[in-house]
Amino acid sequence: MRQIPWETADIAPGRVVQWRIGPTGLTGPPHREERNRRSASFNQDKHHALIDESRNTDEPLASWLAVTFEIGGTLNRAALESALLYLVRRHDLLRCEFHRVPENLSYAVHRPDGIGIEAVDLGGFDTSQEIRAFLGDGFRKSIDTMAWPPYVMGAVLRDGGSTTVYLAFDHIVSDGMSMPNVVRDVQVAYAAYCRGEDPGLPRPGSYLEFAREQRRCYDSIGVDDDRLVYWKAFIGRNGGVFPRFPLDLGVEPGRLYPPVNDTATLLDDRQAEALEARCRDVGGKPFMGVLAAAAVALRDEGGPDLYRALMPLSERGRATWRDSLGWFVNTLPIEFSAARDLAFGQLIRGVRDGFTTMMESIDVPFIRAWELFAPEHFTGRCWPFPVNFLSYIDMRRCPGAEHHQQWRPTAYVWVSRVNGSASWFQRDSAGLHINSIYVDTPQAHRTMAALQGRLRETLRAMAGPVALVSPRPMPAVLLQA
């Protein structure tokens, strides 16, 4: 399973059917469990406020995450419809309506039996390009943080061929690790309904409970709290909350830009296995090799010897949340040396030590640290400058991964405007891949192309017979690729 730009989605032509979710019968006022009105998580509150404040500006902000996957053979349309309804009834966050109150963002929850589903035929399309353009435009118009439901569900139906199912979510109800759960839930439920059985999946943990516990622990945290020691130490060394992206992207301060979204394979499966083995040989884990390579590549492109970045981390560590949908992501700064005189083992141990220290603060919400230590930037429409941001997910460990070759799931991220760059690394059965979103400027195109080429060379050198910290000098033609 990979994350790629929507513009490169491989969706064969067919007839598009979309399913609308609403209160039972799709008429009348919502039937909500008002007694369950609760405060949203810190991530959701900040996201909602940001989208709301930008709605009436020249550059309204928006974002969505989507997934597509295949159902083989002749489609049982009733079973698919039931599987999609099952998904919404199964996950309470998909039944939440958000409401801004003076203190914070809260939500009221529709009861599972108060939700209905209705199919709408949107017509046939003759080419993949038409399908992508139509669906992408529909996602941008239909997915609204401020409206319910903030997601769309549908399928591309074909006579005598496979069916492509698509679901797209506003970030307020989902994160990247939710996408494999969506695929698994719908596929398992569909197969069960085709057999005339119940899906029988274990009950997932409630994101509402996660948000409640997070609020209880961190609503009242102050700058002198001992749980913020790591943040304060990092800020003291870094000079602020945000670690800068150290290369030139050609951006102006305070300005947002249209995004570029690109993807590439950095290592095939054999090369990725070799890198993982070398990391384990020196006491590290595979993702530490990716972090180390990113640091070395940045350094060799003109960045500093000391690597600093914001790293999103899954908060699904407890089995309670493994099967859940929601925004289970915290963000923490990581810091380690990428000095030229370090041997490979020393470099990996430095990454390991930096990661271990960082993880001691995994429960402290990034939003609270940002609000406490950079209040002058907290109400802004974006981070104050391009930030070094790197994510890693091993898709082979996700629920349902053993069926991914058959289901062919693909993930997508879309944002309306950016002021820097962000990169997501995914490891799957085909190798190691990167998906980057960055500002659409001439300088950023040059910088990111050179960095990606350097990164690929660095990773391959580290995976080679002798794990090198720096690869050989790159040919000029590769730097411009």
Image (cartoon, rainbow, N blue to C red):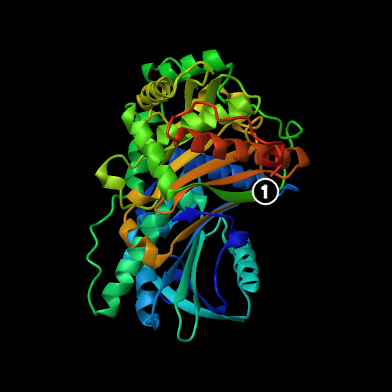
Quadrant where the image shows the C terminus: top right
Q: Is residue 302 above or below residue 379?
A: above
Q: Is residue 120 above or below residue 375?
A: below
Position of residue 70 measured from the top left corner of the image (x, y, whole percent): 43, 70
Q: Secondary structure at mark 1?
A: strand
Whether residue 65 is visible to the viewer of this picture, yes or no, is: yes
The front one of 359 and 255 is 359
Q: Quadrant of residue 187?
A: bottom left
Position of residue 90 measured from the top left corner of the image (x, y, whole percent): 32, 61
The front one of 411 and 402 is 402
Local crowd at mark 1 within 10 Å, few (<14), some, or many (≥20)?
some
- Which residue in the structure is indicated by mark 1? 260
Name the amino acid, label 1: Val
Q: Quadrant of residue 363?
A: top left
Whether residue 175 is visible to the viewer of this picture, yes or no, is: no
Residue at 43% of width from left, 14% of height from top? 224
